Image (spheres, rainbow, N blue to C red):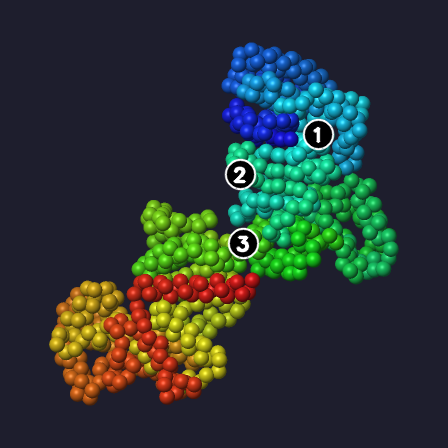
Amino acid sequence: MHKFGGSSLYDADCFRRVGEIIKAQPEGRSGVIVSAMGGITDRLLRLAALAERDDKGFVSELDDIGERIATTAHSLLPAETKARILDQWSRDATDLNELLSSIARARSAPQRSRDLVSGYGELWSAQLLAAYLAHTLGDKRGGRWLDARDVLVVRHGELGPTVDWSQTQRRFDKGLADFEAGVVVITGFIAVDEEGNHTTLGRNGSDFSAAIFAALADADELTIWTDVDGVLSGDPRRVPEAQIIRTLSYNEALELAYFGARVLHPQTLGPVIAKNIPVLIRNTFSPDRPGSRIGRDIAGTHSVKGITAIDGMALVNLEGTGMIGVPGTADRLFAALKRASVSVTLISQASSEHSICIAVPAELAMRAAQVIRDAFADELADGQIQNVEVTDQQSIIAIVGDKMAGAPGLAARFFASLARAGINVRAIAQGSSERNISAVVASAESTRALRAVHSGFYLSAKTLSIGLIGPGLVGSELLEQIRRRAANLHDEQQLDLRVRGIARSSRMTLGERRIDLEGWRDGLAASEMACNLDRFVEHVDADHMPHSVIIDCTSDSGVAARYAEWLERGIHVITPNKKAFSGDQAYCENLRSAAERGSAHYLYETTVGAALPIVSTLRGLVDTGDRIRSIRGILSGTLAYLFNVYDGTEPFSSIVRQAKESGYTEPDPRDDLSGTDVARKLIILAREMGQSLELGDFPVQNLVPESLRDVSTEQFLDELANYDDEIATLYREAVAENKVLRYVASLTSSGEAAVGLQKVSTDSALAHIRLTDNIVQFVTDRYDDNPLCVQGPGAGPAVTASGVFGDLLRLSAYLQGAG
């Protein structure tokens, strides 16, 4: 059995697509239940509304519907068949005109008349499709159609239409007694009541029709063809990361339908459950996709299958000490609501019996509150009940899944996800089956709540939303390293790294899901978005992402000044930028407290020694109780290079110029020669030891002559030769003492610090480094006679980027452990 909705039958191309789907089915007996062509039912109901106002516009609007039917028939059918279909349309239009005219005379459209008007759409689509199938499949396989009013008998009650199964089954068996093979097209939505009057199953009732006819035929399965790929784990309009749920149980599907999953009508599953008929939800426009399968004993990988919401709700709270221990209170409450025809969506009662809270549709809230006040008027007057309170603009967020039963920790994850998103929960409900947990939140926060909860259950704890600031040498190399490794990390470690924002000082580019790292340069160059860090951070820190991280690859103090703000809102920070960690001591301490308040991490291994594990080694020594006696090292790759190459045979100024031309220095070599960068690194290490150290607290030797500090870079390079003799003299002195020149940072446990040029013994580890190596010696209680050394390349875009990448991987490990 197959059911096609209005979107699947919108026009002639859609009819052809449906025909191809039916043609591809195995031969045998097939039933096809159809809705009206897309939009037709709404237009028919509009005809009734116009007629009720005695607006003759219904005549022209009916003609417009006829034009659409005729256009579709012209495109699909041969002349003879088309004439027959359009003749039938003309007879129907005459009947409709007479009915609408009688409505206009009475200025009233009773429900029976509305049902009759609205039911024509299914008749027209069924006849069109049957004729088209006869044309394409041949009369033996296609061409037959069945008016559901000849079979389906229902009676209307408080719970909606109920099928008279015995009478309906007899009619079905009789109507299709000679149907042994082929395709029969059946009208959805319409039926007759027990008196034989035309009626409908209500809006979206064609799914219910499909289930009824599947049960009548004892079908092997029922496929509902629609315009989506299946049942989704969330509303894709509100949850960008919503995924197709491949398998669901009947109970899970019922819960999701109740809570508004738009693919299924809530009544659809009843008939098929009784006959244990599987239901498939598939996409008419992508018939190759498997869709979702619903059945009795269907397992799945997720404990929580769907996260959904009902908006437009209000909470009504009945509260009072006089309710405690008094039997019959709930009975009086719900009896009053029943008399007032108020449907209750959710119930929450405190175990103390001090209050009962219900969620009702917002438009019924004031009526509900009034009937409750009337029912408990005496108790309110006596003070036994203190209040009947209404809170409007509420939404119900629900998680659904059969495997939730008996699985510890799911409720904790649900409410922790809401808490991390800063969402307050007003009421909670859970059925004893443990198949559903619901929470009431403010409607203004419902989308954020959906995204947060969905990410908590459907996205890995290793899914990171990444924003990179500063795609210069280091930043661009980092993006390339991520690009090369992303697929492997996803497959091997389930690590999903999503670069969703890239910003430089002038502009930025943002990606909804992720930025294509193959073409990020072109995307950034073409972007017309001026760099706005507030907007950038809001995008990266999306509600539907479980974790967000800002990677700052600039040396900008203004960006570094934002770290505390980001950490406090729960955004992780990774950076090689030394400004925040070597600047104001109070700000550095504030970073730690901000990270604690936001439960965020900040990683800065590459602020000292690029990818060398200098900071982490020091932290490990301190955390394990070792006492650091002293730190001594070479912390500048540039200065290491200069004094490794300099041997007195060539002027120092020439080596500086060659180093700049080879890319070993900053664009202005004075940034390296000033020693400030080394001093900042030493401050970071001192603070890791627990010391309070700032720039200006210790001597830093500036190798830039004072007279050359304010001139242009080119003038500096030209005039540096005037000072070559000073370096040459120091070099000769060092050689005479069997030593070498090295630019060294040193720190003791007592806080004595210094940065400058030193004569280092040739048997020291600091004397035996490669060109741009950094080296740090830790002398500790454990490493006394033989200091612990960390040595290796300490500069260069690739090395530094790999260190930042390493911090990113460490962050994912922390988050996985926390998850």
Quadrant of the image containing the C terminus: bottom right
Whole-percent x and y of residue 303? 63, 53
Quadrant of the image containing the N terminus: top right
Question: Which-is-in-front pick, marks 1 and 2?
Answer: 1
Q: Earlier in the sequence, mark 1 or mark 2?
A: 1
Q: CA distance from mark 3 to mark 2?
A: 22 Å
Name the residue that disc number 2 marks: 289
- Type of amino acid under label 2: Arg
Whole-percent x and y of residue 57? 61, 19
* Residue 122 appears in the picture as rendered: no
Give the numbered dot on residue 459.
3
Q: Is 758 on the left or on the right of 483, as rendered?
A: left
Whole-percent x and y of residue 27? 60, 27
Quadrant of res 550: bottom left
The residue at the point 22 percent across, 70 percent down is 710
Q: Residues within 10 Å of mark 3 (few under 14, many from 20)?
A: some
The residue at the point 40 percent across, 79 percent down is 686
Q: Residues within 10 Å of mark 2 (few under 14, many from 20)?
A: few
- Type of amino acid under label 1: Ala
Whole-percent x and y of residue 451? 56, 51
Q: Secondary structure at mark 2?
A: loop
